[in-house]
Image (tube, helix red, strand yellow):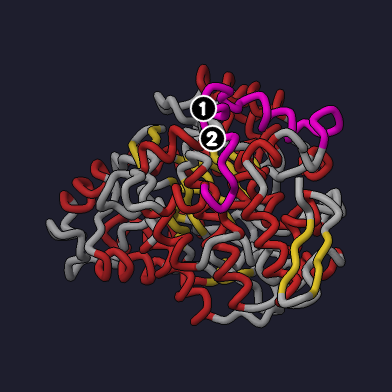
Amino acid sequence: MKMKTTLYGKSYQFKGIADVLAKANEPKSADRFQRIAAETVSERIAAKVVLSNLTVGDITENPIIPPDNDEVSRVIMDCLNVTIYNEIKALTIGELRELVLSHKCKGSELLRLSRGMCSEVIAGVAKLCSNMDLVYGASKIRVITRCNTELGHKGTLSYRCQPNHPTDDVEGILAGLMEGLSYGCGDAVIGINPVDDSEENVKVIMNAIHEFMLKWRIPTQTCVLGHVTTQMKAVRSGAPVSCIFQSIAGTQRANDEFGVTADILHEAYELISRRGTSRGPNLLYFETGQGSEVSLGADEGIDEMTLEARTYGFGRTFNPFMVNNVSGFIGPETLYDGREMIRANLEDHFMAKLHGLPMGMAPCYTNHTGIDQNDQETATMLLAMAGCNYYMGVPGADDVMLSYQDTSYHDDATLRELLGRTPAPEFFKWMQGLGLMDGEGVLTERGGDASIFM
């Protein structure tokens, strides 16, 4: 493998694949914090040149984190389709980028080819893409999954209704849920982040939102986003829920910090298959985001974008119903400003779709960063163009429990109207039946009136 190049008479030498991947990355504060980022624009360009000439085989057969030392690496390699890999292993990363962006290469073919790509290869392609490349490449890929209902159909845009409450007050949660539903938010899932992660509290919330869903015959899914093991205890003791949630990461050490392994996730899937309220077959919900590994000191010296790709490689083996990304949630130590946040979200959506994942996005931010609402809305609109499956729906765009900013119920309705999108099919019919939405997916005069549920 050639690890050096010359630009305008200056030579650039890289230490290995991990070094090339890090220095080819667009500017990110976590990479600067780790001291692995390119020091100049010229060095970044040189790294991209070297990366573009590496082959799929070079990267795949020289793992940046050895499988013997890391479960994520083992899972990624175990699910690689060897036949398809042999078809593409001689392609350079530059040639693979051209193939992915070719107007002749359709989404179905990309999904087939991606089964022969390890996560670091997919990250390499994304590092050679412009923002428009990332939007266009992702827009070609559609991933449809089913829990109670189906998500991801062409012409739809879905939302998770997230009416969190700072004290887990059930009446407060239900009030926020009613408002969200009246705006057409909740067709992806009714998903609550609990403050108290005890089995008993998780069960109380599971019961409340499930009973509300049944009372109003809402065609959707429910999930309470406690730790996977807490949810499993609640389900074993009879609590009703549609799918099981867990945050995942791109290194074994980071997953250890999250308290999750592949075996636990397989066990969770088997449990929810037997004891859950939905027919599936997609029954797991994952959350990810650039920077989680470095924030935990578990990055193994790898850049945050490549680690995010590895997270998707780990997640795809479980055929999840939903995956959503919260790059921007941690703070300026991982993504410093709006430009870095927007770029990271476009990268993440592209990489996840190329992994074959049903990707939703939460282009979010906290108030201690240089990111603002305009940056958040710009990212949201670009991701909608790219074919994002779903977004969050947060009352007033401000999650009062998690203390961060995300898309509001109003934003959700506006995006659908701007793009001519509708909710998921069954939920769309339900909204029309209540007189909340017209046949084009636009809210009626009754839209936004939560009192219809009183």
Magenta highlight range:
66-95
CA distance separating discs 1 and 2:
7 Å
Residue position for label 1 = 84
Circle 1 packing at 10 Å, graded few (<14), some (14-19), many (20+), is some
The reply, left or right, for residue 150 in relation to residue 227 is left
Q: Position of residue 52 (x, y in %)?
A: 62, 55
Residue 55 x/y as whole percent: 64, 43
Q: Indicate the quadrant containing the C terminus: top left, top right, bottom left or bottom right.
A: bottom left
Give the overall secondary structure of the magenta segment. Answer: helix
Q: Quadrant of the N terminus?
A: top right
Residue 281, image x and y in percent? 43, 25
Splitting the image into 4 quarters, where does residue 35 fall?
Answer: bottom right
Q: Residue at x 61, y 54 (%)?
A: 168
| Residue under the point 28% across and 52% down | 156
Q: Which corner quadrant of the image does residue 332 belong to?
A: bottom right
Judged left or right of residue 194, residue 432 is: left
**Amino acid under label 1?**
Ile
The label nearer to you, 1 versus 2, is 2
* Residue in front for this viewpoint, 201 or 84: 84
Which residue does the numbered mark 2 point to in the structure image? 88
Does the segment drawn in magenta span residue 308? Answer: no
Callout 1–callout 2 Cβ contact below 8 Å: yes
